[in-house]
Amino acid sequence: MMKKLMLWAIVICALFGLVACSWSGVSHNPPDSDTQEEEDVSIALWTYPVGSWGNATTVANLLAAFRKKYPRIHITVEYLDYKTGDDRIEQALKEGNAPDLVFEGPERLVSNWGSRGLMADLSDLWDMEPAGEIYNSVRQACQSRDGVFYEFPICMTTHCMAINYDMFQEAGALQYLDEKTHTWTTDGFVQAVNALTAYGQEKVGVIYCGGQGGDQGTRALVNNLYGGEFTNAQHTAYTFNSQENVQALQLLYDLEGIDFNSDIVGSDEVAQFCKKELAMAFCWNVSMEINQTVTNPDLDFDIFPMAFPTDSGKPRLQGGIWGFGVFDNGDEARIEAAKLLITFMAGSKEAYTRAVLASTHRPVRDMDNIYANDEVMNEYGIFTQYMGDYYQVTPGWTNARTAWWNMLQEIGNGADIATAVEAFSKEANQGLAGE
């Protein structure tokens, strides 16, 4: 644990040093770099807490070179969290005061605000050279069904889960997982939970369902256990109402040591896990380990990341993509200024590397391994091969997310699982073609 803590203390210091270092000698050549604006333009950037993109000092350093090059573009920054961020933006939209830029993912920028006609078309940004290096799966996620790009991506990750290695070792539960591949079977998961409860750990894991925060973890857990799907392959409908998913939910409901809790969301689960109140966390990724390892002085156990258990031996993990979207506020000068900032961040290797490092995630395009000497990032790199389908771009995504945690609450309160699953499917598919 101390080795990992020391490592990340060095890594974070290096990151801040890199972000804050002098930009002299670095050449930036975005498409409009020779066009200096003649009038002052003020734009607002609102960012969700993606790695250090939620840190004011880091973001200020990332923006410093842009402000120097374009002194007439004035940028204010608001920092959102996942509990209140969506509500804040919806309120701003109602008041006609939406931000110009948002740093988030396709499920919000494309499937929600983009599908509602609120976002500016960023297709012209995809014509610049670096865009050609972006992975095709990421490209598809950033594009609407009618071919419009509402997001320009910066970074990506693979969501996973984590266990308290020390607790598993003491309970004799390590035998039920494959430490080399960071995988385990559904049967191994069940046996590990049983071993931990026998050891005396009353709360092994929790199905948090107080809201949508961290819901990627509970979805992946349920879908992986018996090979269920969440949507169809075309991303046109929600297909969760299957026997495999009913079986998975029944297993979790019946399993001693796993509790359904409607009072907490993913961030609360992470906090409980890091306090050793839980033996495992379903809401996890590398950014969370970095944050907890570096900033939590009370963390005194080894965190071991794991893929979700599956009966097939082939886990399918959810990916996360983050980047910029631009709200169409009816002011062309502000839209162009916002696009210029995106171009600046993504247009050169140096600036782009800084933006990715600040996220503590991986690049969305082919480039040298920026984490080549990084022990923790390479440990989590094993999960890239398990990346599943990015289904968060299915129409009606916002409605489906709400229906999801409502369904989990009902199951936790004792509702018939098959009935609850059917009700979820009906609600999630409401208004979609063919429904």
Image: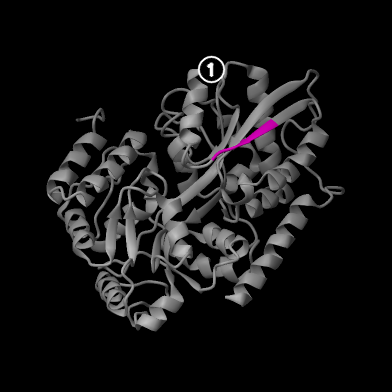
Position of the N terminus by quadrant: bottom right
Mark 1 is surrounded, within 10 Å at the Cα level, by few (under 14), some (14 to 19) or many (20 or more) other residues, namely: few
304 is within the stretch colored magenta: no
Give left or right: position of 241 versus 67: left
Residue 402 location, quadrant? top left
Residue assigned mark 1: 96
The one nearer the camera, 117 or 202, is: 202
Give left or right: position of 69 versus 310: right
SS assignment for the magenta stretch, majority: strand
The image shows residue 315, relative to residue 389, as above or below, that is below
Residue in the image at 78% along x and 51% along y: 20
Residue in the image at 19% along x and 36% along y: 426
Q: Residue 254 location in percent, x, y? A: 18, 63
Residue in the image at 65% along x and 42% along y: 129
Residue in the image at 23% along x and 47% along y: 240
| Stretch of the chain drawn in magenta | 76-80
